[in-house]
């Protein structure tokens, strides 16, 4: 039989009482709460627009060898050590050499722009040596060329207005009939601003349909959407203010919107479902809202904290770029929790007993109870089937997850290059012009730097000869330019072009081969140091750092989630089961992402050009986000199992009861979250597409295969042993009451 701990009753009653009083106060004083939210929302918008910062992908990896190489190059040759970007020209009517005066004017005007260190005139560059593949800057037919512009800051951080000066500088070439496109960071700067409104409208539209079909009530369908929207708008305003102090990536607001809408609708739906059941049970609206806050509000609070803790685990990566992505998502999760605990009760108090006044079909509560409150509905019959054949359901769930996870074993982490972008983007058009004229490797040159500052003059000639010979033989290189000394003679600088595109695994292997093998062999026995730098090399370093930290993130997030489940449900096997099944579901979602994007199974249908690697930080972000979100359904289902177990002591019956009363809301909540995430697949940003699909698939698998098949099957098989916990561990681990069940029982007894 279950056992209670009276020693902790007072504390839990207080906690349950706090949320109950908060819910009742908000429901009773709904005018004050709603006005306060609206005033705060307007104030945050005004302050954010006035003092908020900009989003930028400008970040550095101080310990990465590519950054060290760039720093060395800057110190010895500032003109060559900046951040480079290409301006690509193509004239199908005549050779570009006939526009030499316009080219000279463009070069001169570019060099006058702020932050420009130098601009290379392609018409005056040395000709490609006979027998060597032409990698620019002027094509053999003289109709394609590129200007390499070097900046003292990352061009993508300069703001949209900076492009006005660049447009003016290249106007003479355009007037002469040449097509001019911007590649690299300049091209990223020229991309249209992200517009998530279409995605949001799609997600909201599907959510309305799901809620209407699932619960029948029009008002009940509107409340979660309205609460989530207000919470997300407020959270985004706060994020804008934080952006004034921290450098958040450009994808941050989209990610925050995606997560905020998903959890915001879910949390409000959990509160609303309990409130409606309370109304059906005869409570008045204020008391019903208070009890919903005291019970489901606890689950929302615990779930929200779990998501935030999982996102905080991203800081274990040691990369500020990734840590701040976690912070961005956590901001809207916090606002969603606050909205669910305050705004939702206020809206419910305002609506009163009219929540089902407008309906498309007879409204239903949590359970489909018949006469005498005996459950007779579809989910009850399904729960009985799971209880009778748990091994069959568990095997089916494991089979589905394993099959979906198969592609994971061939995952290739990397950076998604400009070649995967829509042709409406100037950087994609520049990429295609470069690849057609100079080969795919021209879009990702690798700058080799040999620092011979501490090498005696007598040894430098031999070092240069050895370095050149080694580089000429390196596997995977299409072209290796001659190593040339800087003006002070302390550095040898050359460029290596891959046979493949920057995002191809061959280029990644070439970069690592140069860093790990070729250059160490060259400088062996001397005091010289070798580096591979440039945009592509930096991306490879980032990829390697992220890949090395992914196991750390997984361990941290799984460990934290394990402890939370253990603290909430006081069952060692329950916590182990939650961790294992969540890892399996995430592995399955990884497999789907690999199949779609890396294998190309459906990528073109999603607007992705060709096969692309998995963006290096996407698995890390997916793991933290999905592991946190999956705890929503885990806690919501297990809290009902635990509540029934404490009340009846019937382990198997408690599982069936919980599945019966939560299946509908979990299914509806999951469909809504899936629709919100999947709607972002229409984004032009490939990383957003990848995250949207990955998160949508993860939630779908988690809420169906895992939560409705594997979890009840495992819990049925474990029986009362699921709630076993060593006494010493019970004393050490803090107590968290997920649904406030004991507090409610204590409250009801007085």
Image (cartoon, helix red, strand yellow):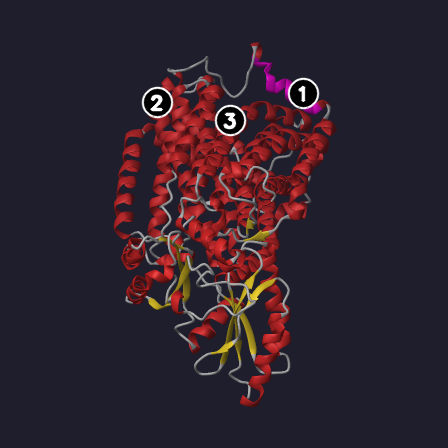
Q: Which residue is mark 3?
A: 668
* Mark 2 or mark 3, earlier in chain: 2
* Residue drawn 72% across the image and 31% down it: 395
Where residue 596 is drawn, which disc sits there?
none
Q: Report crowding for label 1: few under 14, some 14 to 19, many 20 or more residues within 10 A (C-alpha).
A: some
Q: Main secondary structure of the magenta part?
A: helix
Q: Would residue 385 be counted in the magenta stretch?
A: yes
Where residue 351 is drawn, which disc sits there?
2
* Mark 3 or mark 1, earlier in chain: 1
Question: Over which residues does the magenta segment extend?
Answer: 373-387
Task: Report helix, strand or loop for mark 1.
Answer: helix
Q: CA distance from mark 1 to mark 2?
A: 37 Å
From where the camera sits, is residue 263 visible? no
Disc number lying in front (2 or 3) = 3
Cβ atoms under marks 3 and 1 closer than 8 Å? no
Q: Report crowding for label 2: few under 14, some 14 to 19, many 20 or more residues within 10 A (C-alpha).
A: some
* Mark 1 or mark 2, earlier in chain: 2
Q: Which residue is mark 1?
A: 384
Name the image quarter holding residue 95: bottom left
* Residue drawn 56% across the image and 74% down it: 530
* Residue drawn 57% across the image and 56% down it: 500
Give coordinates of residue 621: x percent, y percent: 52, 48
Nearest the camera: 494 or 316? 494
């Amino acid at each position: 039989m279950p056992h209670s701990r009276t020693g902790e009753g007072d504390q839990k009653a207080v906690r349950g009482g706090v949320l109950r009083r908060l819910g009742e106060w908000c429901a009773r004083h709904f005018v004050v709460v709603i006005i306060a939210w609206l005033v705060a929302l307007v104030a945050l918008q005004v302050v954010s627009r006035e003092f908020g910062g900009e989003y930028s992908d400008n970040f550095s990896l101080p310990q990465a060898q590519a950054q060290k190489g760039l720093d060395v190059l800057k110190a010895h040759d500032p003109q060559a050590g900046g951040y480079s970007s290409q301006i690509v020209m193509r004239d199908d009517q005549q050779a570009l050499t006939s526009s030499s005066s316009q080219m000279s004017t463009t070069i001169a005007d570019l060099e006058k722009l702020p932050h420009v260190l130098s601009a290379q005139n392609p018409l005056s560059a040395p000709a490609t040596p006979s027998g060597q593949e032409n990698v620019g800057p002027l094509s053999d037919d003289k109709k394609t060329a590129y200007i390499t512009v070097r900046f003292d800051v990352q061009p993508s951080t300069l703001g949209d207005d900076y492009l006005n000066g660049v447009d003016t500088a290249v106007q003479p070439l355009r007037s002469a009939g040449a097509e001019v496109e911007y590649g690299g960071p300049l091209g990223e700067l020229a991309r249209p601003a992200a517009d998530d409104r279409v995605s949001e409208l799609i997600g909201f539209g599907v959510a309305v349909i799901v809620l209407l079909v699932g619960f029948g009530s029009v008002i009940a369908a509107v409340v979660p959407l309205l609460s989530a929207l207000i919470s997300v708008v407020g959270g985004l305003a706060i994020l804008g203010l934080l952006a004034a102090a921290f450098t958040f990536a450009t994808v941050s607001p989209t990610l925050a919107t995606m997560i905020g809408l998903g959890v915001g609708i879910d949390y409000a739906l959990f509160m609303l479902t309990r409130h409606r059941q309370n109304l059906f049970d005869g409570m008045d609206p204020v008391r019903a809202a208070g009890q919903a806050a005291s019970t489901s509000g606890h689950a929302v609070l615990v779930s929200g904290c779990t998501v935030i803790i999982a996102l905080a685990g991203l800081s274990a990566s040691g990369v500020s770029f990734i840590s701040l992505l976690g912070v961005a998502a956590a901001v809207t999760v916090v606002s969603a929790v606050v909205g669910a605990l305050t705004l939702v009760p206020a809206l419910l108090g305002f609506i009163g007993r009219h929540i089902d006044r407008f309906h498309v079909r007879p409204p239903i509560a949590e359970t489909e109870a018949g006469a005498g409150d005996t459950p007779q509905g579809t989910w009850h019959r399904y729960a009985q089937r799971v209880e009778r054949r748990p091994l069959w359901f568990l095997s089916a769930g494991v089979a589905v997850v394993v099959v979906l996870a198969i592609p994971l074993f061939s995952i290739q982490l990397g950076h998604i290059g400009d070649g995967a972008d829509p042709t409406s983007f100037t950087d994609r058009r520049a990429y295609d012009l470069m690849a057609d004229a100079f080969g795919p490797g021209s879009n990702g040159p690798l700058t080799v730097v040999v620092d011979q500052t501490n090498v005696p003059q007598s040894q430098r000639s031999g070092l240069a000869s050895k370095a050149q010979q080694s580089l000429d033989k390196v596997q995977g290189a299409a072209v290796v330019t001659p190593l040339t000394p800087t003006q002070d003679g302390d550095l040898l600088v050359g460029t290596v072009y891959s046979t493949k595109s920057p995002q191809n695994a061959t280029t990644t292997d070439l970069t690592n081969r140069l860093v790990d093998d070729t250059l160490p062999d060259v400088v062996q026995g001397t005091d010289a140091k070798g580096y591979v730098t440039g945009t592509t090399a930096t991306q490879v370093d980032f990829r390697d750092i992220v890949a090395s930290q992914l196991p750390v993130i997984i361990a941290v997030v799984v460990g934290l989630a394990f402890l939370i489940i253990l603290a909430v449900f006081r069952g060692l096997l329950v916590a182990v089961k939650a961790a294992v099944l969540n890892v399996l579901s995430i592995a399955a979602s990884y497999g789907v992402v690999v199949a779609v994007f890396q294998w190309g199974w459906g990528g073109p249908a999603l607007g992705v050009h060709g096969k692309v690697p998995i963006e290096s930080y996407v698995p890390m972000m997916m793991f933290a986000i999905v592991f946190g979100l999956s705890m929503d359904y885990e806690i919501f289902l297990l809290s009902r199992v635990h509540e029934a177990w404490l009340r009846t002591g019937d382990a198997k019956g408690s599982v069936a009861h919980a599945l019966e009363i939560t299946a509908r809301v979990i299914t509806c909540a999951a469909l809504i979250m899936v629709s919100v995430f999947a709607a972002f697949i229409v984004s032009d940003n490939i990383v957003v597409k990848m995250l949207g699909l990955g998160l949508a698939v993860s939630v779908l698998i988690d809420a169906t295969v895992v939560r409705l098949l594997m979890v009840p099957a495992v819990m049925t098989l474990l029986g009362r042993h699921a709630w076993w916990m060593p006494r010493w561990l019970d004393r050490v681990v803090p107590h968290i009451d997920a649904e406030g069940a004991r507090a409610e029982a204590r409250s009801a007894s007085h």
